[in-house]
Amino acid sequence: MARQADRVEPVLHNRLAVLRAEHGLSRQELADAIGVNYQTIGYLERGEYNPSLDLALRAAEHFDLPVEAIFSRRPFAPMSAQLYPVMTESGRAGRAGQAREIGADPIDHERLQGP
């Protein structure tokens, strides 16, 4: 039986750096808002530390998002792939990097121009 100290914690992926950038927050500002040291934010963003449930909930409350939108056991898909899906050769929606048709444009210009 493995001892507790021998157990390796699984990597917990997160979007803290992206959310900080979107909200124009420094590590210090986010740390102050959720009640931790600014170095903790760096450790979290680099995946060197997994948050407690309490800390994950405080981050979710701060950004007004569900916890699973910030933290995941699986890597997150790139934001660009979620925001700008394109049609692949098979005619199905794919990710921006998957378009292989000549002249395929990953941006829906009509959608961007609005009504």
Image: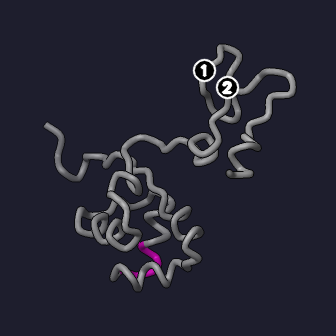
Which SS type dominates the magenta stretch? helix
The amino acid at mark 2 is Met
46, 16: nearer the viewer: 16
Q: Position of residue 80 (x, y in %)?
A: 63, 46
Q: Is residue 82 left or right of residue 34?
A: right
- Reply yes or no: does residue 55 show up in magenta: no
Q: Position of residue 33 (x, y in %)?
A: 39, 83
- Label 2: which secondary element: strand
- Kindly identify the residue that appears in the image at 60 percent across and 27 percent down: 93
Q: Position of residue 21 (x, y in %)?
A: 59, 69
Q: Which residue is mark 2?
A: 87
- Label 1: which secondary element: loop
57, 41: nearer the viewer: 57
Q: Are marks 1 and 2 in contact (CB under 8 Å)?
A: yes
In the depicted structure, whether residue 107 falls above or below residue 14: above
Q: Position of residue 28 (x, y in %)?
A: 49, 83
Q: Which residue is mark 1?
A: 92
Q: Is residue 12 left or right of residue 103?
A: left
What span is colored magenta in the figure?
Answer: 36-40
The amino acid at mark 1 is Arg
Residues at marks 1 and 2, CA–CA distance in whole angstroms = 5 Å
10 Å crowding of disc 1: few (<14), some (14-19), many (20+):
few
The N terminus sits in image quarter: top left
In the depicted structure, whether residue 94 falls above or below residue 77: above
View extreme (front): residue = 115
10 Å crowding of disc 2: few (<14), some (14-19), many (20+):
some
- Kindly identify the residue that appears in the image at 23 percent across and 53 percent down: 5
